[in-house]
Amino acid sequence: MNATALAARLLAERPRPRGIAGWRHAHWLAVGTVCLGAFLGQLTAGITALVLPALGGHFRADFAAVEWVALAYLLVLVALLAPVGRLSDLVGRKTMYLGGFAVFALASLGAGFAGGLWILVACRAVQAVGGAMMQANSVALVARGVPGHAMRRALGIQAAAQGLGLALGPSLGGLLVEHASWRWVFWINVPIGLFGILAGWFLLPRTRARAWVPGVADGDGDGGVGGGVTGGGRFDLSGLLLLTGATTALLLALSTASGLTLPGWAAAALLLASALLTLGLVRQERRAARPILAPGLVNTPGVRPGLAVALIGYLLLFCPLVLGPVLLAGAGVPVVRAGLVITLLPAAFALAATVGGALLPRGWSDVDRCRLGAAVAGAGLLLLALLPVGAATAAGPLLVAGYGLGLLLPANNALVMRAVPPQCSAVGGGMVNMARSLGTALGTALPVLGVHLAGAASGGRTVLLALAAVAVLAVALVRPAGRTPGRPEPGGA
């Protein structure tokens, strides 16, 4: 068997069993499989943030060194989301998604056995490769795997799975660290990953009729849901390197606010380097035959403001999650009670993402939901800034903010994916997740920076007031997006 035939065999996507493919509700089984990956990603984020102190004690390392366990994952994930999305449009989204589960599970197994801190950091970087393979395809698999009228609901269910993982992460991580070992924080991903591979193999429709082979032109387009990308043009390696450099420099600069030890001049140099590399990336993408970020896609009506709103939405979600425990601890609230109060935010987010629309008038568009959601989230954050700090006074505003974000983000993601051409859906989904990751990074760094500059109470309130203003900006940014011509309905094998 020659190399081309072997590649075709390995990359070929298998159809679902006939009984599943023929069932009229089969698309919800596919959505459930995607939700498993969304849950796993956010569960890992919440657990890992909690286990950092235990890792510092075990490896006898300071916080600046231990922080690389979280930072390495974030750097690799953000850098790879868009290029993995481009590659997925070529190879097949189902193939890449299932491969993501496999890489994630194997890296998690290695992380649990790590005998040194930097081995653990390396395993986390590999884990991020698997996370990028899943996240870059999750939105595309949902958006192209359900009927158009059900897209917002499906994306809401996916967002609810993220919220559930985010809510369970800290409490589950605390139990594992206290009653087992920090190693189980990573080993718990292995059975979930194996189950995800099995579920995806049988429940996800194939996204290509035949395997893509490197160097072989593909003119048959779509083999299932969504479509492929025609052959021609080399992979944009220069764009990948520029994108990796720009995002890495930006996130390293932001991480100085989170405790990463860097002198001020180094942080400023990183910001300048990120800006220059971004300019170089824009020039490269305009002339590349097969660009990583597809400038034409970004310029599609509704895509650019939708990506900005996605970034803002996750900034509004993660900032209170990081800032809340600091404010409540300063007010003398016990740690366990503070954790339960903070959990109200992702819990309300998950609930609103699934059934929150039932409280709205019938016939409301996604644009209406986005604007109302951003306004409600801003109102909740404004209340949180103005009311006295306490467990009882924080609970209501966090519920309000979570409900607003649960309305905003699924509807906004639906608007973006409707505007994206079918053959670029994985790239579009990767860009949505890239915006989400950047919003997460900003949401982690901004509270630490505010507290560092002005103290917990004053700095925290200032950050919350700024977030309320940013929510108003999100209301203004929301734009309608027309239905993309040629979007196929589901029904692939």
Image (tube, rainbow, N blue to C red):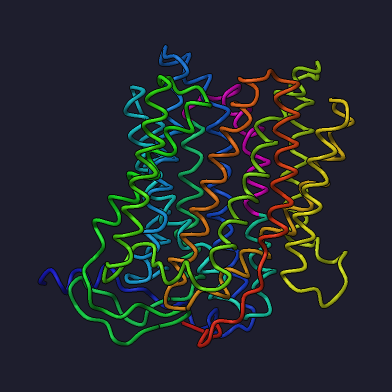
Q: In this view, does 379 lie to the left or right of 196?
A: right
In front: 273, or 139?
A: 273
- Against 47, is 89 above or below? below
Highlighted range, magenta: 161-183
**Residue 98 percent across, percent down from the top left:** 41, 61
Q: Please name whichever residue, 268 or 389, is drawn nearer the observer in this view of the structure.
A: 268
Q: Residue at x 23, y 77 (%)?
A: 232
Number of on-image labels: 0
Coordinates of residue 404 in the picture (x, y in percent): 78, 53
Quarter-of-image position of residue 60: top left
Residue 275 on image: x %, y %? 39, 44
Front residue (pair 183, 342): 342
- On the image, the x and y values in percent for residue 424 come to 43, 73
Judge from the rendering whether residue 387 lies leftward or rightward of residue 19; answer left or right: right
Residue appearing at x 52%, y 19% in the figure: 54
Residue ID at (36%, 73%): 13
Check the image and report above or below for 162 versus 216.
Answer: above
